[in-house]
Image (cartoon, rainbow, N blue to C red):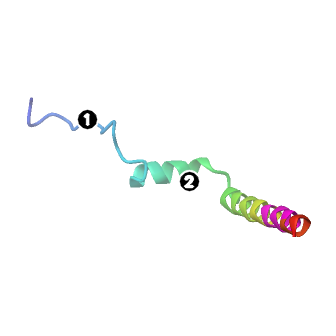
Amino acid sequence: MDPHAEPTPNAFASPTSEDYVEERVADNPPGLQRKAALGLVLWIAWLLVVLTFIVWLVG
């Protein structure tokens, strides 16, 4: 191995490495994270309503 050779990129780099995170954030259109968070909150709220209805039916 040549000690003066250019370092090769690490194929096993962690997905949380700075370059990867910046690249993924750059890929997302503006507001996508907020939209995803809102979708998650609405999904959880819907799930709570359904579970409450089931408990009400059983009880």
Q: Is disc 2 surrounded by few (<14), some (14 to 19) or many (20+) residues within 10 Å?
A: few
- Of residues 43 and 36, the one drawn nearer to the viewer in this rendering: 43
Identify the disc placed on residue 25: 2
Q: Residue 38 at x, y = what percent?
A: 75, 63
Horizontal arrangement in the rendering, residue 38 relative to residue 50 (left or right): left
Q: Residue 30 at x, y = what percent?
A: 68, 57
For this orientation, the residue located farthest to the top is 1
* Residue shown at 9% from the left, 31% from the top: 2
* Residue shown at 25% from the left, 35% from the top: 8
* Above or below, 10 relative to 28: above
The secondary structure making up most of the magenta span is: helix
- N-term-proximal mark, 2 vs 1: 1
Horizontal arrangement in the rendering, residue 53 relative to residue 7 (left or right): right
* Residue shown at 40% from the left, 55% from the top: 18
For this orientation, the residue located farthest to the right is 57
Kind of residue indicated by mark 2: Val
Kind of residue indicated by mark 1: Thr
Q: Residue 37 at x, y = what percent?
A: 69, 62
Where disc 1 sits, the SS reads loop
Whether residue 59 appears in magenta in the rendering, the answer is no
Q: Which residue is mark 1?
A: 8
Q: Number of marks in the image?
A: 2
Identify the disc placed on residue 24: none
- Of residues 55 and 29, the one drawn nearer to the viewer in this rendering: 55
Image quadrant assignment for residue 48: bottom right
Residue range (magenta): 47-54
Horizontal arrangement in the rendering, residue 46 relative to residue 23 (left or right): right
* Above or below, 51 relative to 5: below
Quarter holding the N terminus is: top left
